[in-house]
Image (spheres, helix red, strand yellow):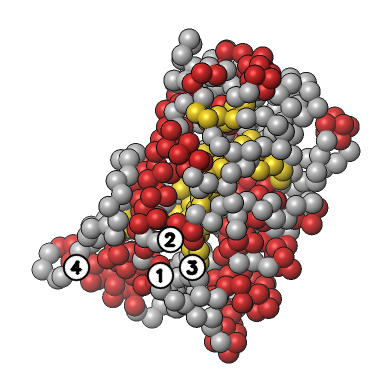
């Protein structure tokens, strides 16, 4: 792995000052605050990969209690959605509730990663303004996230980790703003999306850069050389962008467009040719996204990046019906989605291992919300708390993190129909990864302004 060196104080301040503008002052000041934490960032590379399951994953069937007492409680609440106990894929992890667990039968690849200590589950995590009990929820004695159970609102609140205020930036964007000064002459943004614009990577100074799962986004009808119509058109376009512009708006547009074209050419160059690994990825949307992320991780030294934040997304999780096949609940639309996730995450882990970067890459899932524990027939409805996957070579595996809910409809964790009150906040989940990424405890509130409301700013799942 290449060796990186901390920037000198003079170079660091210079980088920060270069970033200061009318919209970037606060972020630059935040970067100055991490000078005291520079030692934790020396000589390393790290990447954070957010995999967003758009629509609301039913994680009640992602991981299931497999002991007799736990499974009976699960089956009683799930009804027609319950997976057969005999089909569960056992995992060698411990939980603090005395139960044993198994994964959905469509996820044998993730089962192997669990048993190797490279993947695990964060139990019952969700958007919270403050720690909340059922009594407080019923009495509305603490503020609750805005528009609970709404797809659009909860997607934004998960990605911003600010469920009690209007959206301005995402927590991944604020994280990038804080640590970007430690990247070395970066040629492109450290925040790269493989699935279009998102709230997670919106920052104050660091802009998200979108690429396609098959390569860089480029203008159509352009070409190199001057002998073709496309080449002439490209040269004319370049001349127009380089010309002196009459106003600030025109100048900004020309500068940003020229920069985007340049970035596209640069990324295309890195992604052309053979991949620097032999791992074969599924040829699905998710497989293509994660394969491209692996290639961009391999290019980080040439791009001058010591920190990268990626965003991938797949939809289809809003399964109000056809979630399972009656009489064979281990199959159906949900099983197909989980199978894709399992195969693609395993391929991604293997590729990062080939690159010698598995311990430097953490992949985590996020989603709008969980689903109702009981069924509406052959599907489930919008819920709240949910279980999420974490995968990393730096994982402290062998256990389930957080607390599973009581699987009793109308029980102590249920707001109705098995909509679990989260026992872990998105803030705590995110702060654990931000700390691993190099953010000091002092500076966590820069990334996660509400973290002081919660008891566990580091849940300990990453070494």
Q: Are marks 4 and 1 in contact (CB under 8 Å)?
A: no
**Residue holding disc 1:** 1
The relative height of residue 166 versus residue 145 in the rendered view (above or below) is below
Q: Secondary structure at mark 4?
A: loop
Q: Secondary structure at mark 3?
A: loop
Image position, residue 415 (x, y; %): 76, 27
Image position, residue 353 (x, y; %): 39, 55
The relative height of residue 97 versus residue 200 in the rendered view (above or below) is above
Which of disc 2 and disc 3 is earlier in sequence? Answer: 3
**Residue holding disc 2:** 357
Most foreground residue, 102 or 21:
102
Q: CA distance from mark 4 to mark 1?
A: 35 Å
**Residue holding disc 4:** 224
Q: Are marks 1 and 2 in contact (CB under 8 Å)?
A: yes
Structural crowding at the residue carrying mark 4, measured as other residues with C-alpha within 10 Å and reported as few (<14), some (14–19) or many (≥20): few
Which of disc 1 and disc 4 is earlier in sequence? Answer: 1
Q: Is residue 9 left or right of residue 249?
A: right
Q: Secondary structure at mark 1?
A: loop
Q: CA distance from mark 3 to mark 2?
A: 8 Å
Q: Are marks 3 and 2 in contact (CB under 8 Å)?
A: yes
Q: Is residue 137 left or right of residue 316?
A: right
Q: Which residue is at a point 28% across and 69% down the rendered structure image?
A: 237
User: Which residue is the extreme one toward the left?
Assistant: 227
Q: CA distance from mark 1 to mark 2?
A: 8 Å
Which of disc 4 and disc 2 is earlier in sequence? Answer: 4
């Amino acid at each position: 792995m290449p060796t990186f060196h901390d920037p000198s104080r003079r170079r660091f301040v210079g980088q920060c000052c270069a970033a200061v503008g009318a919209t970037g002052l606060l972020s630059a000041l935040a970067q100055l605050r991490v000078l005291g934490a520079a030692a934790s960032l020396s000589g390393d590379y790290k990447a954070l990969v957010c995999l967003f399951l758009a629509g609301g994953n039913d994680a009640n069937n992602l991981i299931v209690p497999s002991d007799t007492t736990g499974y009976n409680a699960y089956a009683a609440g799930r009804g027609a959605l319950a997976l057969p106990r005999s089909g569960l894929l056992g995992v060698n992890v411990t939980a603090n509730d005395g139960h044993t667990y198994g994964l959905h039968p469509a996820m044998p690849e993730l089962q192997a990663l669990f048993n190797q200590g490279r993947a695990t589950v964060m139990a019952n995590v969700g958007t919270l303004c403050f720690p909340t009990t059922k009594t407080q929820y019923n009495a509305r004695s603490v503020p609750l996230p805005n528009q609970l159970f709404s797809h659009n609102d909860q997607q934004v609140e998960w990605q911003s980790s600010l469920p009690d205020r209007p959206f301005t930036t995402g927590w991944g964007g604020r994280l990038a703003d804080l640590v970007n000064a430690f990247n070395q002459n970066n040629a492109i943004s450290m925040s790269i999306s493989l699935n279009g614009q998102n709230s997670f990577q919106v920052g104050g100074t660091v802009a998200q850069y979108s690429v396609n799962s098959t390569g860089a986004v480029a203008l159509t009808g352009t070409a190199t050389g001057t002998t073709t119509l496309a080449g002439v058109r490209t040269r004319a376009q370049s001349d127009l962008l380089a010309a002196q512009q009459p106003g600030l708006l025109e100048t900004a547009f020309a500068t940003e467009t020229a920069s985007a074209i340049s970035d596209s050419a640069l990324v295309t160059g890195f992604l052309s040719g053979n991949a620097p690994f032999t791992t074969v990825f599924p040829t699905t949307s998710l497989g293509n996204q994660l394969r491209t992320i692996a290639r961009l991780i391999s290019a980080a030294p040439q791009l001058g990046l010591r920190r990268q934040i990626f965003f991938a997304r797949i939809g289809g999780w809003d399964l109000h019906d056809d979630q399972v096949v009656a009489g064979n609940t281990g199959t159906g639309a949900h099983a197909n989605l989980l199978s894709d996730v399992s195969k693609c995450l395993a391929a991604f882990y293997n590729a990062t291992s080939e690159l010698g970067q598995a311990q430097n890459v953490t992949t985590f899932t996020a989603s709008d919300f969980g689903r109702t524990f009981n069924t509406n027939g052959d599907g489930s409805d919008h819920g709240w708390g949910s279980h999420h996957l974490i995968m990393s070579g730096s994982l402290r595996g062998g256990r389930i993190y957080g607390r599973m809910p009581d699987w009793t409809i109308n029980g102590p964790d249920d707001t109705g129909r098995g909509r679990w009150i989260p026992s872990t906040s998105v803030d705590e989940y995110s702060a654990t990864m931000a700390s691993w990424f190099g953010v000091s405890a002092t500076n966590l509130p820069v990334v996660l302004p509400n973290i002081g409301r919660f008891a566990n700013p580091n849940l300990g799942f990453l070494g």
